[in-house]
Image (cartoon, rainbow, N blue to C red):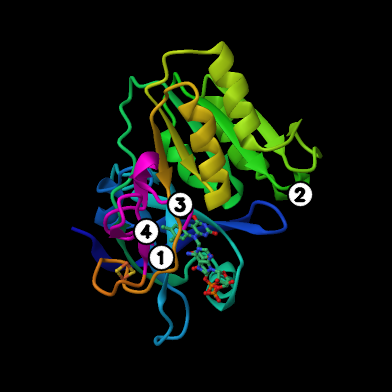
Amino acid sequence: MPIQQLCTVAAATKLNDYAWHLVLEAGRMASMIRPGQFLHIKCGHSRMLRRPISICEWMGDEPEDLVSVVFEVRGDGTAWLSRRKPGDRLDVLGPLGNGFDVQRKGKYLLVGGGIGVPPMLGCVTPGSIAILGCRSADREMPALTEKFREECKEVILCSDDGTVGYHGFVDAQVRAVLEKEKGFTALLACGPKPMLRAVWRAAAEFGVPVRVSMEERMACGVGACLGCATPMADGTMKHVCKDGPVFNAEEVDWNA
Ligand SMILES: Cc1cc2nc3c(=O)[nH]c(=O)nc-3n(C[C@H](O)[C@H](O)[C@H](O)COP(=O)(O)OP(=O)(O)OC[C@H]3O[C@@H](n4cnc5c(N)ncnc54)[C@H](O)[C@@H]3O)c2cc1C
Ligand code: FES
């Protein structure tokens, strides 16, 4: 069951010109988290809806009951969040969503694009390979890249304009990895929908199961309002907040 509580900001840092990293004292919440889940954070004015932000890292061992999130400013809510300082308190509901099923001994191909990179950090296992994509060098989050390097078997960086890492999209790197390396338990991915679709198509050529974390605008965050309904390949609709945000790629209607 998710819980709602006031969390004190323990640290607030900028990762690059666009992305902020907040560490929250999350209490009991920190011991309930699965990779790929998210927090629903009230951003400012009491009438403003909460904003969903994925969990990046967490430490569930008291007294280090810390949870971190990484976000980019898109509108009023995230702009307000970017002005929070250590000591400020945030009204947080979580952890929400189903999350990724990650086995410690599993060998995963982790694929993150843009602001979809931070949630993949929680999925890392020692046998994993991570492919991290960004638009350009100024969008890379070097502190996060370093953490992936410390914990993964291999990290491959790429950018749309070639200013950092390989020049090109992550799906090209997915094909390159799957051509040389076998035995992946699954490919887990988070990022914009066109990226997820391309990654799924690439992995399907090699028969690797794919789980994707989807984004949809949200209101309640707990399956009560239909605000986040997303179409599935079988013609049904599912709630990204409650049935997801993680889905088997073949379940998703990629043409919607
Ligand atoms: C499950 C989930 C996890 C997320 N995790 C992260 C994260 O870890 N880091 C992060 O930076 N962002 C994340 N997002 C996106 C984040 O929730 C939105 O950027 C945020 O709600 C925008 O709020 P705002 O008030 O700043 O902007 P608004 O004024 O509400 O919107 C600004 C612009 O962003 C678009 N937008 C708003 N919400 C979404 C959304 N959910 N998906 C796509 N576009 C949107 C709007 O259409 C508009 O163009 C996540 C979204 C979901 C659903
Ligand atoms: S946001 Fe209300 S049902 Fe998902």
Please provide percent x and percent y for residue 186.
39, 27
Q: Residues within 10 Å of mark 2 (few under 14, many from 20)?
A: few
For label 3, the SS is: strand
Q: Is residue 141 left or right of residue 204?
A: right
For residue 68, the mark is: 3
State the separation of the CA atoms marked 3 and 1.
Answer: 12 Å
Q: Nearer the viewer, mark 1 or mark 2?
A: 2
Q: Which mark is residue 8?
A: 1
Using residue 25 as the reference point, say whether residue 61 is left or right of it: left
Q: Which kind of residue does numbered mark 3 sit on?
A: Ser
Amino acid under label 4?
Answer: Pro
Kind of element beneath mark 4: strand
Q: Residue at x 49, y 32 (%)?
A: 110
Task: Looking at this view, name the residue that lies furthest to the left.
Answer: 1
Sequence-wise first label, 3 or 2: 3
Q: First in sequence: mark 2 or mark 4? A: 2
Circle 2 or circle 4, nearest the eye: 4
Image location of residue 95, percent across then percent down: 30, 56
The disc at residue 231 is: 4
Gap in angstroms between the C-alphas marked 1 and 4 = 37 Å
Chain-order first, disc 1 or disc 4: 1
Q: Is mark 3 within 8 Å of ligand 1?
A: no
- The label nearer to you, 3 versus 2, is 2
Q: Can you give x and y, in whole percent of width and height, for residue 226 in the image?
A: 30, 71
Residue range (magenta):
228-256
- Label 4 CB sits under 8 Å from any ligand 2 atom: no
Mark sitting earlier along the chain (3/1) = 1
Query: Could you tell me the amino acid type at mark 2?
Result: Asp
